Image: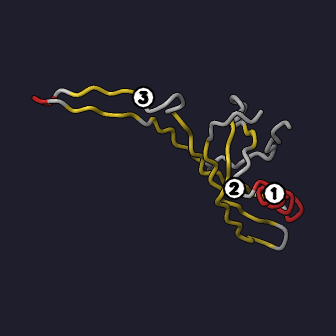
Amino acid sequence: MALDTFAWKPAYTSSGETKATVNVFSFGDGYSQRAPRGLNNVADTLALVFRLDAATWQSVDAFLRAKAGATPFLFSLDGGPQRKYVCDDWKPTKEAPNLYTVQATFTQVFTNQQ
């Protein structure tokens, strides 16, 4: 089964972080060697902000609840490459009668799901 795509666009106040995980082997005299930890050792974490009307917020909430923080989905930030993410943390704030600000954390995952 094909992965679903998260199609909603975040606000420009969103941010991200890329982290490379490495093994560091320290030897005497300050010498060390570094090696990537695993095949996919560079991953992104995105702190996204969405400004949505009530109907769109309900659609986003339904999408994220259906994935339950465990099922990956595809997402592309600003037209970049599509990558697989999970979201197990999102926080809506009602700003006005028909306006929600939603903060969500997308964590890149590496799976064999297509």
What is the three-letter code of the residue carrying label 3? Pro
Q: Secondary structure at mark 3?
A: strand
- Give the image location of residue 48, x and y in percent: 64, 51
* Real-space CA distance between mark 1 and mark 3, rounded to the nearest whole angstrom: 34 Å
Q: Which quadrant of the rendered structure holds the C terminus?
A: top right
Q: Is residue 89 left or right of residue 94?
A: left
What is the three-letter code of the residue carrying label 2? Gly
- Give the image location of residue 109, x and y in percent: 62, 41
* Real-space CA distance between mark 3 and mark 2, rounded to the nearest whole angstrom: 26 Å
Against 62, residue 18 (above or below) is above
Rendered image: mark on residue 69:
2
Tell me which label, 3 or 2, sits earlier in the chain: 3
Which residue is rendered at x = 80% and y = 47% of the image? 8
Rendered image: mark on residue 75:
none
Residue occupied by mark 3:
36
Q: Is residue 42 left or right of residue 7?
A: left
| Label 1 with label 2: CB-CB less than 8 Å | no
Residue occupied by mark 1:
66
Q: Nearer the viewer, residue 85 or 94?
A: 85
